[in-house]
Amino acid sequence: MITPAEAEATIQRHVSPFPTEICPLLHAHGRVLRSELRADRDLPPFDRVTMDGFALRAAAVAKGVQTFRIEALQPAGVPAATLSTAADACVEVMTGAMLPSGADAVVPYEDTAREGATMRLLDRATVTPGAAVHRRGSDHRAGDRVVRAGLRLSGREIAIAASIGAGALSVAAQPRIALIASGDELVEPDVAVAPHQIRRSNDYGLRAALITAGYPRVENFHLRDVRHEIDALIERVLRENDVIVMTGGVSKGRFDLVPAALEAQGVRKIFHGVAQRPGKPFWFGGTTGGQLVFALPGNPISAYTCLHRYVLPALDLASGLDASPNVGAALSERITCPTPLTFFLPVKLATGPRAELLATPRWPNTSGDLAGLSDTDGFVELPPEQREFPAGTVLRVFRW
Ligand SMILES: Nc1nc2c(c(=O)[nH]1)N[C@H]1C(S)=C(S)[C@@H](COP(=O)(O)OP(=O)(O)OC[C@H]3O[C@@H](n4cnc5c(N)ncnc54)[C@H](O)[C@@H]3O)O[C@H]1N2
Ligand code: MOO
């Protein structure tokens, strides 16, 4: 059996990038940016007043002028006024206005007293060139890169894009994902359930996790353990989707028909089985057209863990998202690992006394104990062969 690291690397080798498409800015949040964004003009685009008050020449103040004539009013959103050459000239200005030409500093209202059309500086006013002026191009020059490619777009990048006039963005296409739960025992959550039946929870949970992670084009299906029905559905979803995620039916049981059906429909098995718990029977394959098929074990914690350990990172890679850095967390208590395989242990994360990330184990009862995952932040990966892990051991952590 291959290790989780080998499984991850193998999946990565089979991932090809999703196509690029153009997306209107209003719908681009959560999408992965494919082309960097560059400033279309200097930022700020003009010498921008940063305080409501009066614009004047700092040199006049240095020469002892204390009282100024208010020549004009300069609000935001209109072209710059021009200060006359008189030493005591000033223009009343608003935050966000263009600095009047000829002026080089702004005194806020709070440092002045006004009498009709004149303004007097209070003793506390200190006026130096550039005071309360945000110089043109001082944040970024036209042509500078302001957002790099490979980021998932949040409100921050959307605001930057808007500020540089990028009304449509080049982003990774979102894959169409078929999410198939298989098993005769499964029923919908909102119907009467017989004692021998199990409510479908995996696929609902995986669907929510996929959407939350930025992959909303998910369609759910249910399969009975009937071979010709499995074949027919796989054939159909392969026609319409880029990625297939299945749960259940991949182990060794008489009704674990999924691997054979996938191969019969032209999905090539790349591996079946990973030396890990939970999730040992994980099956991965692909088509010649580049579609990826993840058949996850049916036990709920196995499926949810495998989605986060393998499926979401593969989708992120295909989207061109920057790889997230490996994050380590220190165990808050000593643990004994129950298996010689790599073990994924759910944890609650907190900040320790030296500002380190602390992982507190939250042992689920079994790999079916979904409730054990509630109020956890992710899982740590316990490497194989080592069984005793003292408190303070730093382990790789994956967040849900
Ligand atoms: N002889 C062996 N038996 C099993 C092995 C093995 O190596 N040899 N591996 C075990 C492990 S580990 C796992 S994990 C499971 C995985 O089996 P399957 O992928 O075939 O999953 P199922 O048998 O279909 O289901 C397992 C379990 O999960 C429940 N389930 C399935 N789908 C859902 C769903 N959508 N929502 C809620 N619950 C679901 C299902 O009812 C079963 O209880 O195999 C072991 N056996
Ligand atoms: O390894 Mo299975 O995925 O635990 O129940």
Image (spheres, grey):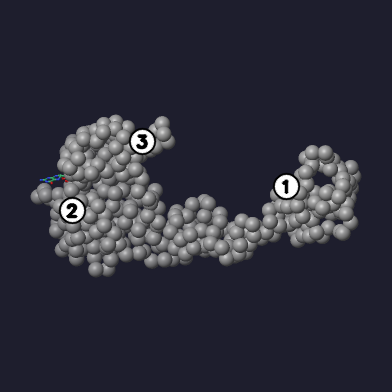
Name the amino acid type tagged 1: Met
Mark 3–mark 1 Cα distance, whole angstroms, equals: 45 Å
Q: Is residue 183 visible?
A: no
- The image position of residue 216, as x and y in percent, is 38, 54
Frontmost residue, 131 versus 52: 131
Reading the chain from its start, which is encountered first: label 2 or label 1? 2
Q: Are marks 3 and 1 in contact (CB under 8 Å)?
A: no
Return the residue at label 1.
Answer: 51
Note whether 376 is above or below 52 in the view shown: above
165 vs 232, left or right, is right
Mark 1 residue's CB less than 8 Å from ligand 1: no
Q: Which mark is residue 358?
A: 3
For the C terminus, the image quarter is top left
Left or right of 270 in this view: 95: right
Q: Name the quadrant containing residue 391.
A: top left
**Residue at 75%, 47% in the rendered image:** 52
Using the image, determine if residue 293 lies above or below residue 208: below
The residue at label 2 has a CB less than 8 Å from ligand 2: no
- Say what amino acid the circle numbered 2 marks: Ile
Query: Where does residue 10 sit, x and y in percent of width and height?
Result: 24, 59
Residue drawn at (16%, 59%), measured in percent from left and top?
261
The reply, left or right, for residue 342 in relation to residue 378 is left
- Apparent side of residue 77 relative to residue 162 in the rendered image (left or right): right
User: Helix, strand, or loop for circle 3?
Assistant: strand
Q: Secondary structure at mark 2?
A: loop
Q: Residues within 10 Å of mark 1 (few under 14, many from 20)?
A: many
Up-down: is 48 above or below 300? Answer: below
Question: What residue is pinned by disc 2?
Answer: 2
- Asked whether residue 143 is in view, the answer is yes
Q: Please name which of the two marks, 3 or 1, marks the residue nearer to the observer.
A: 3
